[in-house]
Structure formats: structure tokens, C-alpha cells
Amino acid sequence: MTSSTLSRPDTARGPRDRQQRNAPTELRRPRPQFGRHLLLLVLALFTLFPVLLVISTTLKTPEDVRVNPFGFFSTISLQNIVDAWTVGRFSDYLLNSILLTVPSTALVIIFSTMAGYTFARLPFRGRTAMFYLVVLGLLVPFFTYMIPLYFQLRSMGLLDTLAGAVLLLTSTGLSFGTFFMRAFFSDLPMELEQAARVDGASELRIFLSVMLPLARSGIGALTVFTFLGNWNNFLIPLLYLPGGDFRPLTSGLYMFTGGRSLDIGPLAAGTLITILPVIVLFIVLQRQVTQGFLSGAVKG
Amino acid sequence: MTTAALPAATAATPLKRRRGSGGPTSTSPAVTRRAQTRLGLLLVAPVMIMTVVFFLFPLGNALYYSVVDFNGINPNPEFVGLANFQEMFLDPEVWHALGNNFIWIIVGTAAPLIIGLLVSVLLWTTRTGSPIYRVIFFLPYVLPGVAIGIVWGWIYDPVSGWLNQALTAIGLGDLTRGWLGDPNIALYAVLATAVWASTGFVIVILLSALRNVDIELVDSAKIDGANPAQRLWYVILPQIMPVFLMVLTLTLVGGFSVFDIIFIMTGGGPAGATNTIGTYAYSQAFELSRIGYGTTLALLITVLSVPFAVFLNRLQRRLSLDGTGA
């Protein structure tokens, strides 16, 4: 993804997308844009540099890292990845990340869709007050209540359990999820729903068979960035899984640096294991990710 | 720091505007209304239960902890009234941390917005390659803060770090230093990382807002003799103002509750030089077991940031409804 795409912007002459058609007319005239491209290229390199650094250090041999921490790899070695995977326990961390992220993301999607639909389309007394209570969670930073939450989980017997961390990851995602899905359902057309009602469909059936299929793209976008948010979450596993048995990649990586040893090689490899799933997901779904952020944030 | 910061600005979208457009109105038959109420209560139940148990209850407890002297062990902590608040106002470290918060908010908001605006306009007016740049610039925003903090900590390393080696290589060896170990520099070094991580998000959002900008206006301003800076300030910026304010709100509110990246890179050190209220509250609560005091500090952030978010939201919404943009 890196070196091949980096060299492309200067030469690419692909079909114009919407945005280029929209560009100011003065710039449609051929005119030297070398300076602009150079500037953008430098900025792009600066943005990618830390990622490239991680990749190149991971691929070095351990001796190469020690002798020559500054340079790029001379021979490719997978030793660092093997070390991180086995000695560094990153295989366990990866498994834990999956065990935490998949159920919590699924729960956020299911619960937010249900509540978002209600807040958009099923009026009843008290609905507005409930909605504001849920959305209050968007305004209050997590660490305002993270300390009491620690003792609450302890007394509930959920501290240092997978279930506890999954529930917390879920609950912190619900405010935004509900808010997002409500906005999405509000924008769907009324006619189908009314037609179904005239045909005698029950309210539950309207939700499941008429509205849910229409909401697929909204659910897809929400899934992607709920997944990203839960995968990247740092504080919840760090605070509420102190024992270390269920440590996911983020807090595992943080703990790995605790020793402050000179093991830059395995550290880079661990970092790569942590960010690789995110990068792959992002590149595959980049349109959904950015569009999702836009529709969630701008339209509201 | 990523998704947590995002929703804050969007929170206060009016319900009223939607009323009547979504869902049946009061003209629906009573049978329908009853069925809707029943289903509605059923569907919101999980979210309401989770909200009460894992948000409202601990939030209420936070208020309680702020008026007791709780060490995390004692089952019956002593009621101390407003002593925690009094200590907070007299604690010089709080004022120092709060000052750092404000530096963080101002620089950490202004820099991504200015750089992001310039780069997004540059991308908008450049013919090719923008989809690729968009992906590259957005990438840091989806990376976990831990990874970002670790890699930048390593770039800043005083001995083998890339930054010092690069400075030496280009003959600026005098500038080398322990970036995260120097109390005068550390905060800005961490801030630079945060700017690196968040500017791409600004670029992508503004770029999409620029798609709706009226090109005729930009062109006619050019014919009227407006220079590029004037065109940006008087013609382009007003048209994307609602989105610009939305991004401003997001970065601003995120700046109040900054935690991850400082915690990971310096832990608030050296000697408290990079403490913000967030890291200070954490160390008081979890390292010194001063739960009551730590919670009081955390409440301060909410009290400070919520009015900002609400104000900017209203402004943004009014501009949007005026039809000037999205």
C-alpha cells in the first residue's frame, strides 16, 4: 500500500470523480502544479512516516536493530514477529481483542438500532426525556465517572471479567450509536411504513421487515466505527481488566513498554500486530469509514 | 481519544425539528399508538438499563465521592463536605494542570484546524490523487492512541530517536534534546503528536464540506480581484462555516478531556510538566488512592467542557438552519 501508492499522485490521470469536476474552473486549465504535488507528497510522507518506521523496524533482524536502529532494514527477518507473538504474548492479546470487540460491537449495534428506531419513529410519553438521558453520555467525558465505575464493577463481581469489560465497551458506545441510528431512521421515507400499516402489519413486523432492511447502510457504517472504537479502546481494558488474563492488544502493548528494555524489535512487531487489523479494515472500508463519520457528525 | 471525542458536538440536535416528520402523528388511531408505546418501551429497555447502570449510577456516585474522603477500601468513608473542592482551588498543581489543558485546547485546536483548512483547500484545488491522499491523511485517526504514543515516544527518544538523529544529520545537532524529558518542551512534543494524529480528520471532513462550495462565487471573486487569501477568508470559509464549527467543537471538547496520549507518552511527567486535569485526576485516584479528590478533579472537566459544547452546538445549528451550508 505504501510505496506504490505514494508515487502515484504525480502521474495518475484516472477518471475525474465528482470532486474534481467541482474544482474551481481556473484550475481545470492545464497549469504547473508541481509545487502543490510536492507539498502534498511531503505531507503524506510525514503522515505515513511512523507507520513505515514500525514496518521497517519489525522486519529487521534483532542484531540489525541493535547495531543500526536508525537505518532501514538490510535483510528481511520475521524473528521480531515470532518473538512478539510467542514471548511477548501478542497471540493471547489478539485473541482477547477479538473476544472483547466482537460481542461488544454486536451488542452496540443491536441495542442502538432498537433504541434509535424507537426515538425516531415510535412516539410515546417520556420518549424525549429518555433520549436526552442517553445522549447526555455524549457530553460527559468517560473519566468523570471512571473512578466510581471501578468500585461499582468490583462490588458487582464484574471487575477483571470478560463480561464486565464487554458490558462497559457496549455501554460507552450506546449513546453515539443510538444518536446515530435515530438520525438515520428519521431520514427514511414515511410512505413504506404507512403502507405496511394499512396492510395490517404489526408494529414489530414493520420494524423487522420494512425498516431494518432499509437501514442496512447505516448499520454498516456504525458497525465499522464501533468496531474501530472498541478495538482501539485503551482505558477500559487497562482499568477494569487489571489481572492481565484478558488483556487485549492496546493495554498489552502498553504493558509491554513497561519494562523499557531495548527490545525495540519485538516492540515494533507488537505495534504492527496491533495496528495491522485496523489498517487493513480501514483500507478495505475507507469509503464507509469516512462517509460514516461524515453522516454521523455533519448531518446529525 | 478518537471516537470518544467525536459525538460530543453532535449531541444536541433538536428533537423538535424531527417531530411530525418521523413517526405517525397524533392522528394515528389509539390502537396504533398503544402498540407503538408497547414496542417502543420494549426496544429502548436495553439501552435505558445500560445507561442507568453503567452511566447514570456511577455519575451519581461521582458526585457522592466528591464530598467524602474515600481511599478505595474504607466501606464507610467520612463525609467531608466541600473540603475536596476547597483543596482543589488551593492546589497549585491543579492550576498548573488547568493551564496545560488550556494550552492543549488552544494549540491542539488551532493547529489542526489551520493546517487542515489549508491542506483541504489545497487538495480541493489540485487535480489528481486526492482520493489517495484522503486515505493517507485519515489513517492516523483510526490508529489506536497507544500505538501512536509508543511510536512517537520512540521517535523522540534522546539517544536513538529518529528526531535527534535526523537533526544531527542535517547539521542542527544543537537542537537535539530529550524531547519528552525536558519539562519546558515535553508538553509541546506530546501536542505535536496529537496534532499529527488529528489533522487528517479535519482535512477529510472539510474536504467533503468543500464539495458543496459554490464555485461560481469563487470564480467571480477572482475576477473581482480577490487574492487567494481573500477568496479563502471571504468566499470559501463562510460557506463551510457550519462544518468548520462542528470540527472546532469536536477538537475543543476532545481537548478538555485529553488523556490517552499524555498518559501513554509521559504519564504527566517529567515532574508534572505535562499534567492535565485528566492525568492528574488519574494519578491522585489510582496511584495515591485519593478516590474522593481524584473524582472531584474529574468533575471539574465536565463542568468546564459541557457549556462549551452546548454553546458551539447552538451556533453551528443556527448557521446550518440559516441555510448557509449543510
Image (tube, coloured by chain):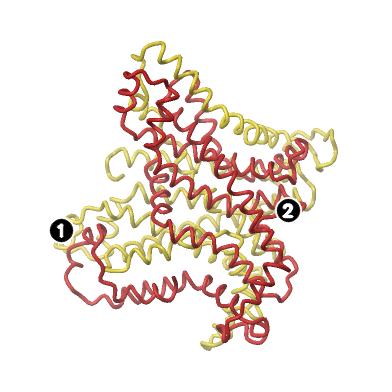
Chain colours: A red, B yellow
> Which residue in the structure is indicated by mark 1?
B220
Would you name the residue on which mark 2 appears? Answer: B283
Name the secondary structure under disc 1.
helix
Depth check, front residue: B326 or B40:
B40
**Residue at the image position 28 percent from the left and 64 percent from the top:** B229
Quarter of the image that includes the C terminus of chain B: top left
Q: Position of residue B205 (x, y in %)?
A: 38, 54
* Amino acid type at image mark 1: Ser
Q: For the residue carrying disc 2, how many other residues have a C-alpha within 10 Å: few (<14), some (14-19), or many (20+)?
A: some
Please, which residue is most extreme toward the top here? B30
**Disc 2 element:** helix
Q: Foreground residue, B68 or A77?
A: A77
| Above or below A82: residue B277 | above
> Which mark sits nearer the N-terminus, 1 or 2?
1
Image position, residue A77 (x, y; %): 61, 80
x and y percent of residue A39 in the render? 36, 74
Judged left or right of residue A203, residue B324 is: left
Task: Give the chain letter at badge 1.
Answer: B
Q: Give the crowd class for mark 1: few <14, some 14-19, many >=20 residues within 10 Å.
A: few
Residue at (61, 61) in percent of width and height: B146
- Say which of B91 and B25 sits in front: B25
Residue A55: image quadrant is bottom right
Q: Residue at x 68, y 69 (%)?
A: A84
Amino acid on which the number 2 mark rests in the picture = Ser
Do tag 1 and tag 2 residues touch (Cβ < 8 Å)?
no
